Amino acid sequence: MHSLKEILSFQPDGRTLTASGWVRTKRDGKNVCFIALNDGSCMSNLQVVVDKENGSVPAETLARCGTGAALTVTGKLLPSEGGGQEAELRADSVTVLGDTSEAYPLQKKHHSVEFLREIAHLRARTNTFAAVARIRSAMSYAIHTFFQQNGFFYVHTPIITANDCEGAGQMFQVTTLDLDAVAKKALPEGIDYSQDFFGKKANLTVSGQLSAETYACALSRVYTFGPTFRAENSNTTRHLAEFWMIEPEIAFCDLEGNMEIAEAFIKFILKYVLENCREDMEFFDARIQKGVIETIRQVIEKPFVRITYTEAVGELEKAAASFEFKPVWGCDLQTEHEKYLTEKVFNGPVIVTDYPKEIKAFYMKQNDDGKTVRAMDILVPRLGEIIGGSERESDFGKLTARMKELGLNEKDYDWYLDLRRFGTVAHSGFGLGFERLILYVTGMANIRDVIPYPRTVKNAEF
Ligand code: 4AD
Ligand code: MG
């Protein structure tokens, strides 16, 4: 059997074939009935035409073909007599595989994204969410393609870990302890984690980076691509508690090399989507964000702007009056600052480097000025940060000194420090938030709408 995508690519030469899908709409004429069938393989529907007079499809069957019903139709593929599509399937027989009813929530009318979030188990049956799902799949494939073509090995880093890569304490704890029982005992001495499943406190990973570094210092070029978890109490359109991150890690590579790879990587994905997801991108361009295709084209053409954090703060100070949060050297850039830089000053992606060490993680390579680190964030219009990365501190002494300053226990990171004890080497990497890149590519407004089942503060439905 052929997918509707295949069928719609065939010459409408009268061949007989069978198509399956779900009814999007049914329109009854006097002598004919039009059924728009969709199977999700592409955006377009197949128009099925049923002759009501020749008796090929009983009236009782046709009555069951309402919006949402699952059908198999056998008929002849012919040039369409009506406008709007090239081919139509003139039905010889229709079988209802699964009935529907008036209670089906996706009756033909406009539904808000907020409403569709409440029926997330059905929303992939709408044009928008099916297109997002197809683009997400295509982008995943492009990500693996980019790395595999460039000599990177895919490494599966653990989901459950005992460390906090970013040191921000935003972890979900993983335990098999009976918390109710523990609470009832109200232990003044605290919980005895030696009794827990792993014999110590464990959590869901916030980043695969530290493990990826160990493999980069063996295979030279590696990447991870998997779910990561952050218990951040951020109720925004850009934060999820569970999101997917792509993290390459490259040995014998400094910050310059890291930025080059990150830029080439983003451009590769954008180009892949434009070339391979045309129908869906045209939909986003027409219905979700006007001009998104042209924006992406321009991003592919132009080199990304590169500025230091200090220069960025200089730019922001010129417009200080327009911000809610005053730009001050030493403070993290706020989203409003990132948007200003990308939208007002540079009109495109910007790579900001050399942030103050106080606002970045312990593992970043320290600059000679004693104040900044070899970090790089990539910021884009509309969203702000989509990539965070750095060259890693490869000097044992400097790294352990920084860990001490931050109160990190060296013992916990002993295996990580081994990389600096044995054959240490310059290495760099970054993390790309997958859902943020999907937002950027599709023009969708809310991160909850580019992952099938979003997990956010107070929400783990479905
Ligand atoms: O800047 P972050 O925290 O960097 C790291 O985790 C590094 N260990 C990455 C590395 O160097 N290997 O996160 C990286 C990216 C961010 O730029 C953002 O795009 C995304 O992950 N991100 C989130 N996306 C959705 N929801 C959240 N709560 C996110 N937190 C970070
Ligand atoms: Mg970051």
Image: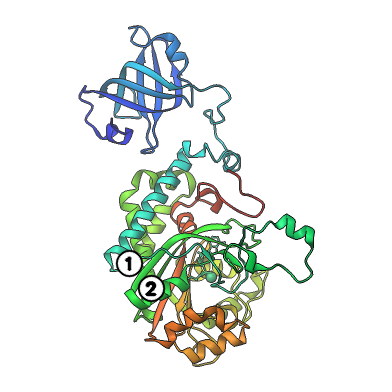
- Residue 436 makes an appearance in the image: yes
Q: Residue at x 57, y 38 (%)?
A: 119
For the residues carrying marks 2 and 1, which lies nearer the camera in this image?
2
Residue most extreme to the front: 195
Name the residue carrying label 2: 215
Q: Amino acid at mark 2?
A: Tyr
Considering the numbered disc 2 on the image, is that residue within a helix, a strand or a loop? helix
Image-based side of 460 in relation to 226, left or right: right
Estimate the x, y position of residue 98 in percent, counting from the top left.
45, 23
Q: Is residue 348 above or below residue 123?
A: below
Q: Secondary structure at mark 1?
A: strand
Residue 356, can we see it? no
The answer to whether mark 2 and mark 1 are in CB contact below 8 A is yes
Q: In the rendered image of this protein, does residue 20 appear above or below residue 214?
A: above
User: What residue type is disc 1 on?
Assistant: Phe
Residue 254 sits above or below residue 158 on the image? below
Q: Identify the image quadrant of the N terminus.
A: top left
**Circle 1 sits on which residue?**
153
Q: Quadrant of the C terminus?
A: top right
Where is residue 317, by image quadrant?
bottom right
Along the viewing direction, whichever of 257 and 292 lies nearer the viewer? 257
* Residue 175 position in % (x across, y down): 62, 60
Q: Position of residue 342 (x, y in %)?
A: 50, 68
Check mark 1 vs ligand 1: CB closer than 8 Å? yes or no.
no
| Horizontal relation, residue 122 to residue 233: left or right | left
Give the x, y percent position of residue 290.
46, 49
Decide: is 160 above or below 106: below
Q: What's the CA distance linking mark 2 and mark 1? A: 9 Å
Q: Nearer the viewer, residue 178 or 43?
A: 178
Going 20% across and 25% down the picture, which residue do you hit? 13
| Label 2 Cα crowd, 10 Å radius (few <14 / some 14-19 / many 20+) | many
